[in-house]
Amino acid sequence: MSRAARALIDELADRQALNRQDLLALLAARTEDTAAYLFERARAVRHAVYGRDIYVRGLIEYTNHCSGDCYYCGIRRSNGQAERYRLSPAQVLQCCAQGYALGLRTFVLQGGEDIYYTDERMEALVRAIKTAHPDCAVTLSVGERSREAYAAWRQAGADRYLLRHETANATHYGKLHPPSQTLANRLRCLHDLKDLGYQVGCGFMVGSPYQTHECLADDLLFIRRFEPHMVGIGPFIPHRQTPFAREPAGSLGMTLYLLGIVRLLLPGVLLPATTALGTIDPLGREKGVLAGANVVMPNLSPADVREKYMLYDNKLCTGDEAAQAHEQLQRRMQRIGYRLVVSRGDYIGGPACAHGVGSGGA
Ligand code: SAM
């Protein structure tokens, strides 16, 4: 590792910030040694804030109907070959009950932009989950809606919202989406959500078509400025029935490197080791945790719909029952020195929580 790269990582860890030029230099400096040092610093920060606890979220992929047409996504409106499904509110509640019995205390409802689930139906669903499980957090990841809808869902008890910004570079955004979907509206949603008191997650895919280091620097600067509570980062993986079918997947190494950088930028951030990471490498989620991630999101959806929520080819989806998968995840985390905890797993602190975080050491 060059001395310059080490100095950049030290500066990032000490100040929780780097300017654009330095971020570009850090992205260009990625080697095995540089990454190993970055991960060591990221783990130290993560241990100081969250210890060796891994927060678990039960992911419920409740619908793959989508009115959006993102060029990268397998459930986009224009994919006439996608086999569509939607879980009923009763089925969603069943998934939650099953997750609760396993010790999960956060449920993430994720889906396409499904017009069946109107603002009112979503509100009723959130209320029903919170009534059944008042000690649990509900995270929504259901795309772009009005401020009024977000406000009503928050009132109904929704705690968190995941809405990846996808790319903070407007030109790049235009290459990944049709003209009707704009970065401006995505950002409007994120700001509304934060303003309404949600714990908010943004994020992006690594290696999406047309992405450059400049785009990634824009993403990192945006994340630092916006200060989300959560950041979802996973590799882009092509889907054969999309316009990006022939594009290469994002790299494992670069995804891990970005997880490490984000941990140093925002020490208290909730950072999942994503399903996409587990899809491109059998040990992807473990590697994500060792790079600074502290959240995993096992799938609670009924086994027979999992393979229909196919955002990209070969998406990791075992036919395992939720209980079996949970046990396996627990073992995998224990093997690398971490443990799944029974907790809502709320966000701890902003950049200030980095005070007293020592250097080096894992
Ligand atoms: N509709 C909601 C939204 O837009 O936020 C949530 C569902 S959307 C399918 C969830 C995330 O999947 C997106 O934010 C995107 O980053 C990711 N995704 C979609 N297609 C992907 C692909 N081909 N490879 C990797 N991630 C993908």
Image (cartoon, rainbow, N blue to C red):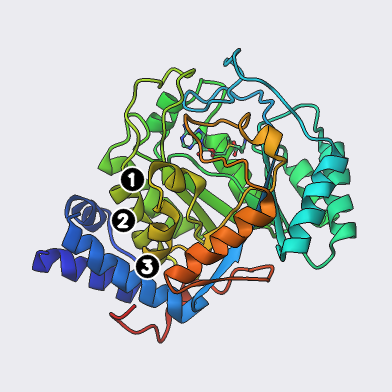
Q: Is residue 38 left or right of residue 126?
A: left
Horizontal and vertical percent for residue 44? 37, 77
Q: Is residue 240 left or right of residue 8?
A: right
Q: What residue appears at the point 37 percent right and 53 percent down from the top-left corner?
A: 220
Q: Which image quadrant shows ligand 1?
A: top right
Kind of residue at disc 1: Leu
Which residue has dot 3 on it? 264
Horizontal and vertical percent for residue 169? 39, 38
Kind of residue at disc 3: Leu
Decide which of 216, 318 is in the foreground and name it.
318
Decide which of 304, 241 is in the foreground and name it.
304
For residue 106, above or below residue 188 = below
Q: Are marks 1 and 3 in contact (CB under 8 Å)?
A: no
Which residue lies most toward the top here? Answer: 80
**Whether residue 60 is visible:** yes
Q: CA distance from mark 2 to mark 3?
A: 11 Å
**Which-is-in-front pick, marks 2 and 3?**
2
Q: Under tag 1, what secondary structure?
A: helix
Mark toward the start of the polypeptide (1 vs 2): 1
Which residue has dot 1 on it? 216
Q: What residue appears at the point 56 percent right and 22 percent down from the top-left corner?
A: 69
Q: Under tag 3, what secondary structure?
A: helix
Quadrant of the frame with the N terminus: bottom left
Which residue has dot 2 on it? 257
Kind of residue at disc 2: Tyr
Q: Is residue 7 left or right of residue 50?
A: left
Horizontal and vertical percent for residue 101? 78, 62
Number of numbered discs visible in the structure rendering: 3
For residue 106, above or below residue 6 = above
